[in-house]
Image (spheres, grey):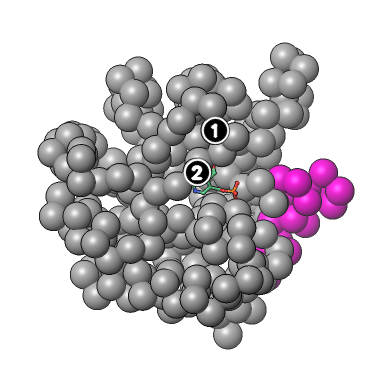
Amino acid sequence: MIDLNINIDHIATLRNARGGFEPDPILGAIESINAGADGIVCHLREDRRHIRDEDVIKLRELDTRLDLEMAVSKDIIELAFKVKPELVTIVPEKREELTTEGGLLIAPRKEFLKDLKNKFHDKDILVSLFVEPDIDIIDQCLDIGIEMLEFHTGHYANEYPKNLEVNLAQIKKAIDYAKSNGLRVCAGHGLNYTNTTEIAAIKGIDELSIGHSIISKSIFVGISSAVKEMKGIIENAQK
Ligand code: PXP
């Protein structure tokens, strides 16, 4: 079974729009887990535009697996060491972007990433790198001893249903290669209620990380129904 991890960033985006405390992303996480989600993801951005440090600390207190998406900034690394989520996903970050726009470039920062991965592993924190589904990039990740990757599905999602076969083939090839090298595999970005079936049908995916579409749907149907519907799509795709 593929695990579904819910990214709750946009509950915090809405909360921050008024500068108050509603809606509460922690409550969103609890409701998601109660509805059958397998874990929670949050992205602590350098500008703290949605999730804040205190949210991460509170999320860690919940009885659920936490994936902290993060850029490699000193203060965020320190917070991650302190909070100790089960998983950190290293993502590239540009201040002016609306959302993460592509996978990490590994080659120019190989030694730095290897050292960082070792420091996290020493603290029993698993490290995943958010990368493009590309064999050369997977090889670079293998060189630094990475045990988990998240493949960027943004390109697939943006073009969907155009170039479906080509984009799916690229993702499938990357997943096969990562699995044959013993990696744990996640996929995410831009997945929604119409484009997730094809991705969830790919053999070898361990986890999906989905946020914007589920939180958007939850405005109309509630977060519990939105999570259950996505769980159903993923389960049916694997039959
Ligand atoms: N995975 C990563 C690494 C991301 O940065 C994001 C967006 O925060 C997601 C998954 C989830 O993307 P979406 O919100 O489009 O579902």
Please indicate whether residue 155 sits to the left or right of residue 78 in the image: right
Is residue 160 within the magenta segment? Answer: no
Badge 1 marks a residue whose secondary structure is loop
In whole angstroms, how far apart are the C-alphas of marks 2 and 1? 7 Å
Q: Considering only vertical position in the picture, is 145 above or below 62?
A: below
Q: Nearer the viewer, residue 155 or 28?
A: 155
Badge 2: residue crowd in 10 Å (few <14, some 14–19, many ≥20): some
Q: Is residue 13 above or below residue 232?
A: above
The answer to whether 200 is drawn above or below residue 13 in the figure is below
What residue is pinned by disc 1?
A: 97
- Three-letter code for the amino acid on which mark 2 is drawn: Glu
Q: Quadrant of the C terminus?
A: bottom right
Q: Quadrant of residue 169?
A: bottom left
* Disc 1 residue crowd, few under 14, some 14–19, many 20+, Cα 10 Å: few
Q: What number is the disc on residue 119?
A: none
Report the magenta stretch's main SS: helix
Q: Is 230 inside the magenta-drawn segment?
A: yes
**Magenta-drawn segment:** 215-232
Residue for point 15% across, 50% down: 144
In the image, taking residue 110 as reference, residue 86 lies left or right, namely right
Q: Which of the 4 image quarters holds residue 18?
A: top right
Q: Is residue 64 left or right of residue 87?
A: right
Asked if labels 1 and 2 touch by Cβ distance under 8 angstroms, the answer is yes
User: Up-down: is 67 above or below 27?
Assistant: below
Q: Position of residue 28 (x, y in %)?
A: 68, 39
Where residue 37 sits: x, y (%)? 59, 55
* Residue annotated with mark 2: 101
Q: Secondary structure at mark 2?
A: loop
Q: Residue 141, percent across and down?
A: 22, 54
Which of the pair 223/209 is nearer the observer? 209
Q: Is residue 238 left or right of residue 150?
A: right
Q: Amino acid under label 1?
A: Glu
